[in-house]
Amino acid sequence: MSEKKTIAAIATPPGDGGVGIIRISGPEAVGIANKIVQIDLLQKESHKVYFTKALTPSKEILDEVLVFKMCTPRSFTGEDVVEIQCHGGQLVCKKILQSALDSGANLALPGEFTLRAFMNGKIDLAKAESIQMLIHAKNTAALKAAKNQLEGHLSQKILFFQEELFSLAAILEAWVDYPEEGLEFLTTEEFLEKLQGIIFSLKKLENTFFCGSKLNTSTKLCLIGAPNVGKSSLLNALMEKERAIVTPIAGTTRDLIEGEIHLFGHHFTLIDTAGIRDTDETIEKEGIRRSLEAIDKSDLVLFLLDGSRPRTESESALLKEMDAQKTIVVTNKADLLPPRVNPQGVLISAKHLTGLDTLKELLVEWLETQNGQLSKEEVILVQERHFKAIQQAIDFLKTVEMGLKEGIGGELLVMDLKSAIHSLSLIIGRNVTEEVLNQIFSRFCVGK
């Protein structure tokens, strides 16, 4: 990804829409854009919007557009940037982009605009990753975590830890370099106490990854139960469309059927499974095996019971095996419930769409309880790369802690202390390798 080249790409998602944006960045951005618009963009002021027409290199009019001129360094990438805002048809966007390419621009690689922003010091690596998180956020919690990271909360925390560790490293080096001076900015006990405080804070941050890692993924919600308890009907009711086949014949569902729903800002992946029962039928047995496998891989399980009949021994046995922390019992067929019978769990009728609001609220309540340990203002680790860097830093600091207790010389401990600082640097992009950068930015969409 050469910084010397001028790059261009469509910055809006594929498909037709109201508005499309073509982004151009690099040393020749203004000159290239000047060739494909009717106005003299070279003479126009920076950071203003101009109404004009987009042209082909042969001066054929393509569309009426708005042109945004942003000269270095006050732009997203830190370079000269021009954004052309046109009508959002796929063809007109491609035509304008092609005009830019024909006029000397190079097609941008995935994430290349954001990479240039990072390379030019406009954002650090954690902020760059938050842009991708923001684009792909599937729920309000993920959106908030991405916003906090974009605002620099994680970066500020990492810089704070580094400053504290640099201070400790300086003290260690002073002890080593000037032993005859009797320098002791901190006693060994005070040094150890300060170090343990940093380790504690880092471990607290590390522990947020358990919930944070799930923010960018949907909650896997598995529907299980005996044949004909109404799993497929419930799937259809929650999705508000006929996703699964529903018949009175037991064993209709043979394979896993998935669907996506959003409830109050939370994203769920519903998994309809084969009815669990004893059977000799080969295909149905395979479906049941997959159902049991889906239970293990799911975040939450809805265990459906048939309200029109008593619970069977096999249902009771299976229910006892379920993890109570991730299982919600649902009694379906409320319209067929016998008199003076107290149903177990949530009472619904998937057929008549009753009780579904209560069930939806319960699902969201369960999910928010799982994430409830994360304070609203707390920095949350979402990226596995950040989690591993924190783990590595903690390991180095524990080595320093153990060394202090065992009386190991400061010249050896300072090396581990600096290694911990280096591990934290990887999060915000200092001393990061080109291979890591390529892995991160290759996941971005073209135009970002």
Image (cartoon, rainbow, N blue to C red):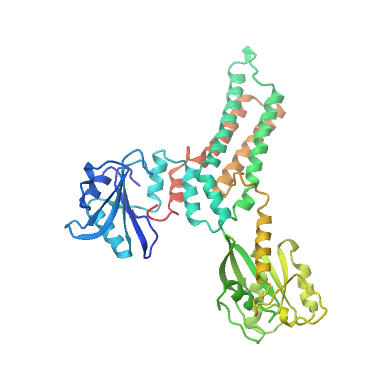
The x, y position of residue 147, in whole percent, is 52, 48
Residue 229 drawn above or below residue 394: below
Q: Residue furthest left?
A: 58
Q: With 443 as the anchor, is 252 left or right in this view?
A: right
Q: With 423 as the anchor, is 105 left or right in this view?
A: left
Residue found at x 30% / y 42%? 4
Residue found at x 57% / y 43%? 389
Residue toward you, 161 or 399: 161
Residue found at x 38% / y 55%? 446
Q: Quadrant of residue 263?
A: bottom right
How many marks can you see?
A: 0
The x, y position of residue 50, in whole percent, is 28, 49
Q: Quadrant of residue 397?
A: top right
Q: Residue furthest bottom?
A: 249
The x, y position of residue 365, in whole percent, is 68, 60
Q: With 325 as the anchor, is 360 left or right in this view?
A: left
Residue toward you, 131 or 299: 131
The x, y position of residue 2, in whole percent, is 33, 45
Q: With 317 as the anchor, is 383 left or right in this view?
A: left
Residue 328 drawn above or below residue 109: below
Q: Residue furthest top?
A: 181
Residue toward you, 144 or 441: 144
